[in-house]
């Protein structure tokens, strides 16, 4: 029996560039802390998209992520929504950022 393996999504690390800067600035503006860059945390659907466009993976700080009783602080969800808004506005209006 021959076993053939196929890699459907390569690991990725987005290099510094415009989207990296936009997301980093939005996180800093909302949290007062620069983002911690890391490849720790598991797999991401971004591995399928990286060949098509830059990918920056970020989200809630959450010790219960993907567990049975997953929960997040309401303020963390609101802060994340504000970060997303900043990212979208900066991406759509690069001259104003």
Image: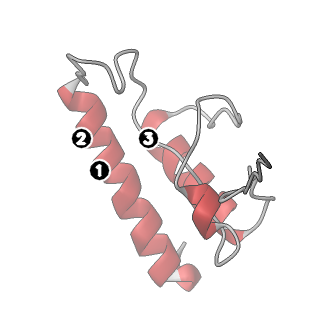
Q: Residue at x 56, y 81 (%)?
A: 94
Residue 97 position by quadrant: bottom right
Tell how many labels: 3
Q: Residue furthest front?
A: 1
Residue 93, given in percent of the width and then of the height, sits at 48, 83
Give whichever of 51, 37 is nearer the camera: 51
Instruction: Tell me the mark number nearer the camera, choosing from 2 and 3.
Output: 3
Pointers 1 and 3 in contact (C-beta within 8 Å): no
Residue position for label 1: 81
Q: Identify residue for label 3.
A: 59
- Measured from the top left, where is residue 50 in percent x and y? 67, 67
Q: Residue at x 41, y 70 (%)?
A: 88
**Left or right: residue 72 compared with residue 94:** left
Q: Are marks 2 and 1 in contact (CB under 8 Å)?
A: yes
Residue, disc 2: 78
Which quadrant of the view contains residue 34?
top right
Residue at (41% x, 61% y) in the render: 86
Q: Looking at the figure, which quarter contains the N terminus?
A: top right
Distance Cα–Cα, label 1 vs label 3: 10 Å
């Amino acid at each position: 029996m021959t076993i053939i393996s196929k890699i459907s999504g390569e690991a990725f690390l987005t290099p510094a560039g415009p989207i990296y800067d936009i997301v980093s600035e939005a996180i800093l503006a909302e949290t007062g802390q620069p983002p911690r860059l890391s490849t720790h945390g598991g797999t991401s659907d971004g591995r399928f998209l990286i060949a098509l466009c830059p990918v920056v993976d970020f989200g809630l700080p959450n010790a219960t992520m993907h567990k049975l009783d997953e929960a997040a602080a309401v303020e963390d969800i609101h802060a994340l929504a504000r970060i997303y808004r900043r990212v979208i506005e900066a991406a759509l209006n690069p001259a104003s950022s």
